[in-house]
Amino acid sequence: MHIRTRRLLSIAAVRGPRGRCWRSLLFLALLPLLLAACGQSDSAGLTVTGSTSVAPFAEHLAELYQHAHAGTAINIQSLGSSAGIQAAIDGVAEIGMSSRELKPEEADKLDELVIARDALAVIVHPANPVSKLSLKQVQDIFSGSVRSWSALGGPEQPIDLVIREAGSGTAGAFDELIMKGKAITITALRQGSNGAIRQVVAENPNAIGYISLGIVDNTVKALAINNVAPSVAHVEAGTYTFVRPFLFVWRKGHTFSPLAKQYIDYVMSAEGQQELQNLGLVKGPASP
Amino acid sequence: MKERSISFILLITAFGALVALGLITYFIFQAGVPLIAKVGLWQFLAGSTWNPTAKPPAFGILPMIVGSLWLTFGSLVIGVPLGLAVAIFMVELAPAWLAVVMRPAIQLLAGIPSVIYGFIGLTLLAPVIRATLGGPGLSVLTGAIILGFMILPTIIAISEDAIRAVPIAVREGAVALGSSHWQVITGVLLPTARSGIIAGIILGMGRALGETMAVIMMIGNSLAIPVSPLQPATTLTSNIGLEMAYASGQHREALFATGVVLFVFIMILNALATTFVRRPGTSRRSA
């Protein structure tokens, strides 16, 4: 069962861009309807809005919850972390989702709950002899100043970079956690989903890319950075630090609707947490 | 009475299509034009840096315009000779049974979803190109070859019709003058059907320019301006398709503005195609 859902998710990830074209087409065609619908809020259901990285997981748990409790309506909207945070501050959505830490001015207005954490892994082709890099080397590779594998103990081959497109949460996390603001070279190949990056890297012996730790499988090799391998154990021990939190946020002092309370309880229950870990996420820090 | 109500219903349906076109045009321009006005038309079209989420952001779509031109030109280089050859073969040379097999096969080629073409380019062609010619494999060349095949049905169907529509008298006249079959084809049929063939090529070009899904999968989507067919590139369409999901604010407006540019490109191509679609021989006779 778990393996099946995981496979479904990764298929969905590979097909991501297609879904997106659809979404933008639909957006165009239905814009007037959407605008009209925005004015009404659904009083019976629960709206959870925000990060596109968190949304698939929240959606998965919402489906499981709704399956077990017929007649409940949980609406997950995938609009980006900032939009989710704003929606929570404004009270438009009861729960906001964020895949980045709150800024101080946001934290003043919101309470947060870490539902899980996600680590970034730098991946190469399994046949690549390189298996570890320093953070500086990763930065040099992605900023374009190191262009051949021979400079890193590999063969005399050019390095093909594979990155996510501007705006994606994973790209934002990579820029912040690993590049630390350094610009990525414009010659990098861009792909529309974690799954697509994994596929391109799996087929190209010269490629290097980054994806969520949960998406790493045996078709690619995850590199150790500063001698620490990306693994759930190292994330939990705090030694692998390229990690972002997946947050639920809500307005300070907000009284939850019964459904919101039950949904959050389900997400944090042993069963919900196990689901998230089966999908490759790491559980939040020990404190409640 | 019944006749009238049916024709009224059909009229409404026809208007539905017009209204949809009008709405699409309105929304794209309404969402895109303000950003072009703010950035400046020249800056937008000729700027070579696209970094919509940087501070300050840069909105230059020259890499995508160049990418679209490269890819469209490349697919025509592959698709036009091949398509024309098939059309001539189907009309002039193919035995009847073979034409019966080929026509549905070509129609099937048009019916294959573009994501399948993209998948073939990504998993079969790209590794071969990387291994034999170098580069990352996902490149203008990979995209152009597959896209060349994707536009074949359009070029074949319209060229075939144009060649078939050449009046029998013209052909008989050429044969009566002692021309060989090949001379009839190159000296009479092709020149006479020229306007139809060009219309087919332009429609194929529109297809190549507008293709999105397959292109995202095959072309690598890098933001550098490609200087060799072995390098990756981004096109106008693939960038919209790739970035739309997570775009917000100005970034989203810039993607709509890219759509405006694409819209104008396609309008020009369609206008050209319409001028070329005349009855074959018309332009010939008036000349």
Image (cartoon, coloured by chain):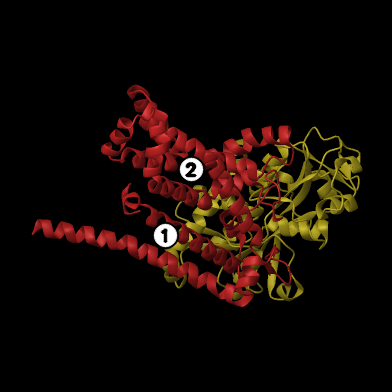
Looking at the image, the residue that sits furthest to the left is: B1
Asked where in the image residue A182 lies, by quadrant, the reply is bottom right
Chain bearing tag 2 is B
Name the foreground residue: A21 vs A158: A158
Kind of residue at disc 2: Ile
Provide the letter of the chain coloured yellow.
A
- Measured from the top left, where is residue B117 in percent x and y? 54, 39
Q: Which residue is mark 1?
A: B271
For label 2, the crowd category at 10 Å Cα-Cα, with few meaning under 14, some 14 to 19 and many 20 or more, is many
| Residue B174 placement (x, y as % from top left) | 33, 34
Is A19 left or right of A138, judged from the image as shown?
Answer: left
Residue at which label 2 appears: B151
In this rendering, the answer to whether B171 lies above or below B14 is above
Query: Left of B135 or right of it: where is B201?
Result: left
Along the line of sight, the residue nearer the viewer: B159 or A210: B159
Chain the render paints red:
B
Q: In this picture, is A224 found above or below A47?
A: above
Residue drawn at (62%, 33%) of the image: B124
